[in-house]
């Protein structure tokens, strides 16, 4: 009879260990999520600071160009380029704050992942295309031989947009397939 009494105690000891282990893992996971959110928030603040610095530099360039008697277009185009980059950096900082800090959750559904990737890639495509356009204007008159780089940038922006369209198409088909699978399974 003794071994029979002892066997349930061993089982209960194992159950206690199983219950403690998930609590510890849950706390570790929560701490990791908190630390990750702090780092994302710091990165977003750093990007915002850099963006504001670029905006300040752009305004000082525009002011200098407008007050100088012999204003060159390149100074204004540099200011536009800096503004475009600063807005893109600010957009990425906003995206990081919204998706990683404020929501602080994993993407649970395929359409959420698609929307997040779409937002990010649209930002990248806009920055690359606007930078390409600015460089075309800068090098178009003074150095036509240097137009290869801006044209390649414009080509890359087109490839990004086409790739984004392909991604959207496949992900929508995947979502439809998942939805049909859920409907076929139905409620139990």
Image (tube, rainbow, N blue to C red):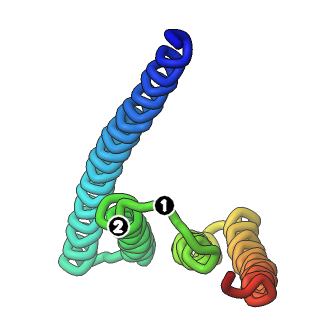
Residue at figure coordinates x 44%, y 75% from the top left: 77
Pick whichever, 148 or 20, lies toward us: 20
Residue at figure coordinates x 55%, y 11% from the top left: 3
User: Residue 98: x percent and y percent?
Assistant: 35, 69
Asked if residue 98 shows in the view, the reply is yes
The residue beneath circle 2 is: 103
Quadrant holding the C terminus: bottom right
Q: In this view, does 9 lie to the left or right of 144?
A: left
Residue at figure coordinates x 77%, y 82% from the top left: 185
Compared to 25, does 138 lie above or below?
below
User: Residue 74: x percent and y percent?
Assistant: 44, 71
Residue at figure coordinates x 75%, y 67% from the top left: 152
Mark identifier at residue 31: none
Q: Distance between the residues labelled 1 and 2?
A: 9 Å
Tell me where residue 91 sits by quadrant.
bottom left
Mark identifier at residue 106: 1
Q: Residue furthest top?
A: 2
Compared to 146, does 166 lie above or below?
below
Asked if residue 141 shows in the view, the reply is no
Q: Is mark 2 on a helix, strand or loop?
A: loop
Q: Is residue 27 left or right of residue 186?
A: left
Q: In this view, does 157 lie to the left or right of 109?
A: right
User: Residue 37: x percent and y percent?
Assistant: 32, 50
Compared to 41, does 6 lie above or below?
above
User: Residue 165: x percent and y percent?
Assistant: 75, 83
């Amino acid at each position: 009879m003794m071994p029979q009494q002892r066997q349930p105690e061993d089982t209960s000891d194992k159950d206690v260990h199983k219950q403690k282990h998930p609590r510890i893992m849950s706390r570790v996971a929560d701490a990791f999520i908190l630390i990750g959110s702090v780092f994302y928030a710091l990165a977003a603040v750093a990007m915002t600071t850099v963006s504001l610095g670029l905006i300040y530099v752009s305004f000082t360039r525009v002011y200098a160009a407008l007050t100088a008697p012999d204003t060159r277009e390149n100074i204004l185009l540099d200011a536009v380029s800096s503004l475009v980059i600063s807005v893109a950096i600010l957009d990425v900082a906003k995206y990081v704050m919204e998706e990683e800090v404020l929501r602080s959750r994993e993407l649970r559904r395929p359409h959420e992942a698609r929307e997040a990737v779409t937002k990010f890639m649209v930002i990248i495509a806009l920055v690359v295309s606007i930078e390409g356009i600015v460089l075309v204007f800068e090098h178009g008159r003074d150095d036509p031989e240097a137009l290869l780089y801006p044209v390649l940038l414009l080509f890359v922006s087109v490839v990004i947009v086409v790739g984004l369209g392909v991604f959207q198409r496949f992900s929508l088909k995947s979502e439809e397939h998942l939805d049909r699978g859920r409907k076929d399974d139905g409620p139990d």
